[in-house]
Amino acid sequence: MSLSNDYFHRIRDLINTIESEEVEAIQRAAKEIARSIINGGIVHLFGSGHSAIPTQEVYIRAGSLTNALPISLDRILDTFERIEGVGEALMRRFDGRPSEVLIVFSNSGVNPLPIEVAQIGKQLGLFTVGVSSVEHSRNSEPKHSSGKRLMDIVDLSIDSHVPYGDAGLALEGLPMKIGPLSTIAGVTIINAIMAQSIEEITTAGETPPVRISRNMPGGDENNRRYIEQYGDRIPELRY
């Protein structure tokens, strides 16, 4: 069997573990999102470096909630994620409102930037969710002066079950592992949360703000209604 086959098996095992171990946490996050959206709120997302990918996954994305907004899409933040104070500076322009939901992605869960974003989100009254690898986090020293990890700060912690170091495959003769897993875990978790949120909103008798591909019949017409509803907070919906 080739290493590529091993990678597929490793992915399946990881997703099965997330499903069996984190479904309750995913459902709780979805209920909070549904409650917030029914009351007029939007969903806030944050991640830096490769942890920003799950936030981009559902940003103005067909088949998902059209009111999910990353705090920042700037790749340069990866350079500063270990420096205290950057998160505080970033959050000065944050438009989060009490009872909305903020989901923070950080594979290690120990760098100051995502920790500060989560801390400030909580201070502003948002329900905070952290997605990180508990194994990696517990095996890494916190880099924030508080001595806390992301999972210690948020209202709800979701374990990505990604192994320490992210990579999941060993190759004979190679001293390090290969085959990173955190991106697959992150996008799977956020899409599961979004899908469950949409179900919760529908079950409550409300219409979820789901975006349709603009390359499908009726896509532009469907999506245009959300410009009026959320365009003041998510200006990119206009383009």
Image (cartoon, rainbow, N blue to C red):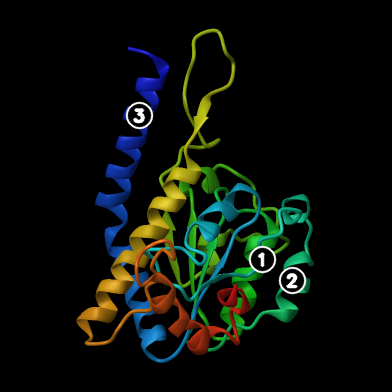
Q: Residues within 10 Å of mark 3 (few under 14, many from 20)?
A: few
Image point (57%, 79%), residue name: 122
Foreground label between 3 and 2: 3
Q: Which quarter of the image is occupied by the C terminus?
A: bottom right
* N-terminal label among 1 and 3: 3
Amino acid under disc 3: Phe
Amino acid under disc 2: Leu
Q: Name the one closer to the observer, 44 or 104.
A: 44
Image point (27%, 87%), residue name: 206
Q: Which mark is residue 8?
A: 3
Q: Is residue 189 left or right of residue 90?
A: left
Identify the secondary structure beneath mark 2.
Answer: helix
Q: Which quarter of the image is occupied by the N terminus?
A: top left
Q: Name the one closer to the observer, 126 or 144.
A: 126
Can residue 109 be seen here? no
Foreground label between 1 and 2: 1
Disc 1 from disc 3: Cα separation? 31 Å
Amino acid under disc 1: Ser
| Figure check: 180 above or below 191 | above
Image point (32%, 76%), residue name: 31
Q: Which mark is residue 72?
A: 1
Identify the secondary structure beneath mark 3.
Answer: helix
| Figure check: 100 above or below 77 | below
Residue 61 percent coordinates (x, y): 46, 63
Q: Which mark is residue 120?
A: none
Q: Is residue 53 left or right of residue 79?
A: left
Circles 1 and 2 in contact, beta carbons < 8 Å: yes
Residue 159 percent coordinates (x, y): 42, 53
Which residue is identified by label 2?
Answer: 90
